[in-house]
Amino acid sequence: MSAKQKITINKRNLISSTAVGFIIALCNTSGFVIKHNHSLKFGIVPVLYFVAALFAASVLTFLIYILSERLFGLSLNNEEEGRKAPFEIFLIGWIFFLICWAPIFLALYPGLFAYDNQWQYYMVVNNDISTHQPVIHTLILGNIIYITEKITGSINKGVAAYTIFQAVVMGAGCSYIAYSVFKRNKSLVPSVLTALFLAFYPVLTIFVFTGTKDSIFSIALADFMILNFELFENPDGFFGKKGKKIFWIILAFVVLSFRSNAVYPFVLTIPFAAFFIIKKSAKKREALSMILILAALYVAYAGPFCSIAAKEKVSKAEMMSVPCQQMMRVYKYHNAELPEEEKALFDEFYDPDKWYGYYVPEIADASKGSLRMEVYSAKKSEFWGLWKNWLKRYPGEYVDSFFENTYGFYYMWPKYVLYSYGQEAFTVMHHMQPSVPNSKIPSLYAFLCKFEDGSIVMGNFFVSWIFAPATFLFLSVMAIVYVIKGRKYNLCIPIFFIVLLWMTYLLGPVASVRYQLYLYILFPIWPIYMKAAFLKENGR
């Protein structure tokens, strides 16, 4: 590489680092302001905060880019040409994860029966399944627990059986990540570091044994991003392997069926993927058949299968978090100013005897839960008319409502609200009935409980950022900007899907850690994308 090329690359690194620094500074400053002022009111302190954050984040990003490039160059020099990645590495990794996680399982025994698991279990027991939760996950979780309970007479053994099932699935998914890192680097060091992170990072290990749908969804999404890397790097090679195509279809189906909000970014990404494949691949029929099989599988699942299996459909109120939260904020903070006829109309739409009196700025459960859907269905135009009227009069409240409901996604020291009535917690660490906690390693369980509402994740400025979703969001931003800087535009297609997916969570009810679990698991995958961009930029 000539001196001129090096200068050009360093200039790109500097510009890209500044762009990343700007994004991080803007997000953290906005979060800081909204957390402490409950509105986006900027003064001299936030401006100084922004400047300091911009400088620190830009310098840190630049150093990370330079260090990454040196490591990429070093790995290229140390690679053994033609060395294959034996499948035994995957099997060894799988066993390694299960061994490493065994103490966590014993500490959390029988596994964290938490979040929506209680509801899903009773759905199966009472044969009253709802599409409010992914039907396939409800059936798997509920039936494993219920059948095991029937055989053994113990609900705890039923929960343990599901927990083991989930750990085995996630162990395979994590091993595939470490295996793929080895294949790309042809060196054990990056693979071992990846395995150690996935095996011992506390947030990940806790969710391996937490029954929420987001655990399997997140590992499936991470593996899906690896396959998409291979697809968009070498489409003909990918489509020439039947096993890869089948694996892609399975992972895509899990991603789409476990999280309905993934469907929208997936559909929006398909045209860009199709354009790339038409232009770059000679195996267009294989690509088309793969998409058609996935589409048929998902349509059959979301249509006839769910219609037969589920008696109750998900309420449309679940998609109303943002407007409901905005209207409830205006009603609470400006009640004395509102005309009586508008308050009367508001009272028609929202049930005062349900969650009405519980407006919590960080979580929309009470707001959308109060919405009378039968009234909304009959008077949609009046509902949106009232929403527009209040938007015109109180635009600032609408903006503040959105940011206060979402800043936990992009601020490194947020207020974590986990429960509908405003109780704060990072993640659930207790067992819901009828499961009964029976830890086999109480001391380890006591330590892990610090990740529910302890200062290690909630109130320590110097430590809690290590576990914040925003930290892993910013690491993702660094990687994404690096890929764009390297003009690796083919890899921007799967990245586009991830960006859109993240944006869909901004329309949800709360900035929950479990919703962002996939960002933690993507962390060791991003260097694969970055290295490909490094090779492109350096003409290798």
Image (tube, rainbow, N blue to C red):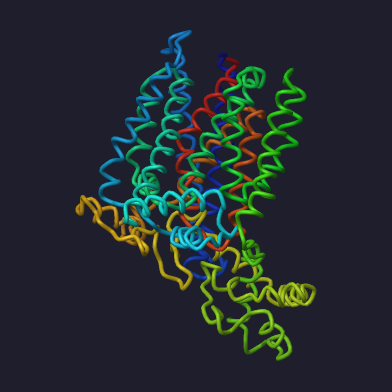
Toward which corner of the image does residue 374 lie, by quadrant? bottom right
- Among all residues in the image, which is located at the extreme front? 151
Q: Residue at x 39, y 31 (%)?
A: 194
Q: Quadrant of the N terminus?
A: top right
- Among all residues in the image, which is located at the extreme right? 381
Toward which corner of the image does residue 315 lie, by quadrant? bottom right
> Which x, y percent locates residue 527?
49, 30
Residue 459 visible in image = no
**Number of marks in picture:** 0
Q: Quadrant of the C terminus?
A: top right
Residue 149 visible in image = yes
Q: Is residue 539 left or right of residue 160?
A: right
Q: Residue at x 51, y 37 (%)?
A: 222
Q: Is residue 521 above or below residue 459?
A: above
> Which x, y percent locates residue 116?
47, 60
- The one of 26 and 380 positioned closer to us in this rendering: 380
Q: Is residue 151 left or right of residue 231?
A: left
> Which x, y percent locates residue 350?
64, 79
- The one of 449 and 164 positioned closer to us in this rendering: 164
> Which x, y percent locates residue 170?
43, 39
Q: Is residue 403 above or below residue 165?
A: below
